[in-house]
Image: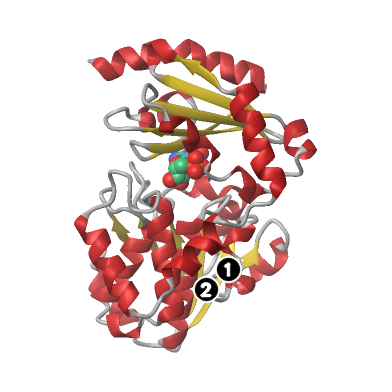
Amino acid sequence: MKDLGLLFNYLKQPRRIVLLTHVRPDGDAVGSALALKSYFEIKGHIADVIVPDDFPDFLNWMFQSDKAFNHQKNPKTCFAVLARAEVIFFLDFNALKRIENLGEDVKKLNRPYVSVMIDHHREPDYFTDYMLWNDKASSTAELVYDFIHMAGDADLINTEMAACIYAGMALDTGIFQFSNTTSRVHEIAAHLMQKGINIEQIHNNVYNQYGENRMRFVGFLLAEKMVVVAEHRAAYMSITMAEAEKYKLNNGDKEGIVNLPLAMRDVDMAVLFTEDRDKIKISFRSKGDVNVEFLARNFFNGGGHRNASGGSSKLSLEDTVKRFVEVLPEFTQQQNN
Ligand code: 5GP
Ligand code: MN
């Protein structure tokens, strides 16, 4: 692994930089990429963001969010942008498989480029020249802040960049309430506030953007579909494609739903199964020591963090749920050992 000092040196000349996020990019991924895009542009580089697929509409307020290239929608343009990159940043993920087809494009590149991972997920693959990786960091946005600091450019953080970094940290910490909320997170948030961000506006932009359909859907899900497994202090829900269609859900509408059962005193683990065209997407959340990363990694081809992980299954929705219910006792037992 090379020393980041060498990278800062390489970036003394204007470069063509491409910033990539994971699939179904969230606020941390998109905020990190757009903050870095602004930063690199201020430094005189050309910086393009490529996302593998759509990000939720509630991130559209982020500065230059309309400039991000969407690989699913414009694969050819994205490959052309990628092919001329001198530096590629991999943001908020740590294994090429996390960007699916876009990862295949990266593997096809036949000219040399400098690669940099900035990430906070457990168990990284070591596939880049440089890494700013720390699984104790709250978010990739926090590490982006550190990166700009290390480059000696904290003064260049403007209001737009500060808002992107703040939103990334806020979203990944559940608005400063999860166990990844360190004193450093609050220090950085304070510094970002000094850059003139409007916190109320950011929170309204991110959280208070639902349509009536989404609220009705959550009511339906909690009333009709949530299953509580009291014995294992777990609760799970599933969303079929037909239900998503009936309630006209867009991808942002599913955000945050997985967390809801954790508001119950007697539940320490919440799971959401979402039926997709070719697979079942699974989200895991937990409180305290319950390590859902272990569950996601060992049983559902996924990973993430101790208290927030994701995975997928090629079984049917019904069989995926069945498998979860089957492995639950084994998982609880392992947790207790
Ligand atoms: P979410 O449930 O919000 O999709 O994801 C929760 C966390 O787990 C995020 O930090 C996300 O990056 C990670 N994650 C989600 N899906 C996967 C997956 O399929 N594989 C891995 N390794 N991590 C995932
Ligand atoms: Mn993140």
Q: Is mark 2 within 8 Å of ligand 2?
A: no
SS for callout 2: loop
Closer to us: 276 or 89: 276
- Residue identified by numbered label 1: 82
Q: Quadrant of residue 178?
A: top left
Asked if residue 178 can be seen in this view, the reply is yes
Q: For this rendering, which residue is in front, 148 or 9?
A: 148
- Residue under circle 2? 85
- In the picture as drawn, the residue positioned furthest to the left comes out as 183
Q: Residue at x 42, y 34 (%)?
A: 285
Helix, strand or loop for disc 1: helix
- Determine whether, in the image, residue 85 is placed left or right of residue 287: right
Kind of residue indicated by mark 2: Ala
Residue 61, quarter of the rendered image? bottom right
Query: Is 146 left, or right, of 44 in this rendering?
Result: left
Q: In the rendered structure, are the residues bearing label 2 and label 1 in contact, judged by CB atoms less than 8 Å apart?
A: yes
Quarter of the image where the N terminus is located: bottom left
Q: Residue at x 33, y 53 (%)?
A: 176
The residue sitting at 64% across, 67% down in the picture is: 69
Q: Quick check: 269 above or below 201? A: above
Q: Is residue 292 above or below residue 92?
A: above
Residue 191 % position (x, y): 28, 73
Q: Residues within 10 Å of mark 1 (few under 14, many from 20)?
A: many
Frontmost residue, 256 versus 9: 256
Q: Position of residue 155 (x, y in %)?
A: 29, 85
Q: Position of residue 245 (x, y in %)?
A: 78, 39
